[in-house]
Image (cartoon, rainbow, N blue to C red):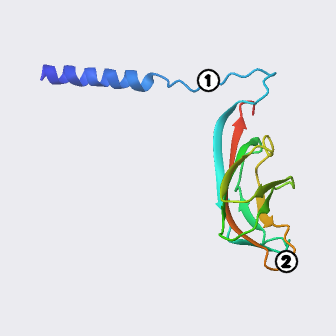
Amino acid sequence: MKQRISSLLLACLMLCTMLGTPASAMEVTSSPDAAVPAYIYNNYFSGGTGTMNSMSGSKSKVFTVSSGGLSDNARVTSVELSVTVSRGSIPFYIVITDPVGHEYEQYVSATSRFTITAFNDLYPGGTWRIYIYNEGVDFTEVSTATANMRVNYGYDSYA
């Protein structure tokens, strides 16, 4: 009986010691002169398009990707774009517009992946728009593609 009580007390002491020790958090060091802000929380949202068709220089249907609710101090760290081009398509431009209206165009001639930094440090919250257009002039000059976009963002350590 005495041995059981000793074992129980020892187990309680070990449990209290483990639970009472604070876990160390990741330390972020950044000086006010740093070129790139330090982000202590990182996340992303993503979405895809349906089939985008552009014929004879026309603009395709516009697809949207929404962020959902984000904190006011969220900032874009990069945008990743994966584009799948259908066989027989002529080269085209894919256009991404952020919720405020900043636009980015990328020339696409084949299925590819891009990392875009043009939106870095901008607020990512809201509805993003994606579409394609080509420079064709004849009705047989068609571009068809789908895209998946991932917007990576972080929360700065000063908020």
Disc 2 crowd rating (10 Å Cα; few below 14, some 14-19, many 20+) is few
Judge whether 110 appears above or below 7 on screen.
below
Q: Residue furthest bottom?
A: 139
Quadrant of residue 75 within the rendered picture = top right
Judge whether 103 appears above or below 11 on screen.
below
Q: Which of the two residues, 15 or 73, is positioned nearer the viewer here?
A: 73
Instruction: Kindly state the secondary structure of the residue where label 1 is placed.
Output: loop
Screen quadrant of the N terminus: top left
The residue lying at 56 percent from left, 26 percent from top is 25
Residue 35 at least partly seen: yes
Mark 1: amino acid: Glu
Mark 2: amino acid: Asp
Q: Which residue lies furthest to the left in this view?
A: 1
Q: Which of the two residues, 90 or 159, is positioned nearer the viewer here?
A: 90
Query: Residue 139: where, in percent of width, then height?
Result: 82, 80
Where is mark 1, residue-wise? Answer: 27
Quadrant of residue 111 within the rendered picture = bottom right
Query: Residue 97: where, in percent of width, then height?
Result: 82, 57
The residue lying at 76 percent from left, 20 percent from top is 31
Residue 150 at least partly seen: no
Disc 1 crowd rating (10 Å Cα; few below 14, some 14-19, many 20+) is few
In screen coordinates, is 143 left or right of 138? Answer: left
Q: Which of marks 1 and 2 is in front?
A: 2
Screen quadrant of the C terminus: top right
Where is mark 2, residue-wise? Answer: 138
Q: Which of the two residues, 56 or 159, is positioned nearer the viewer here?
A: 56
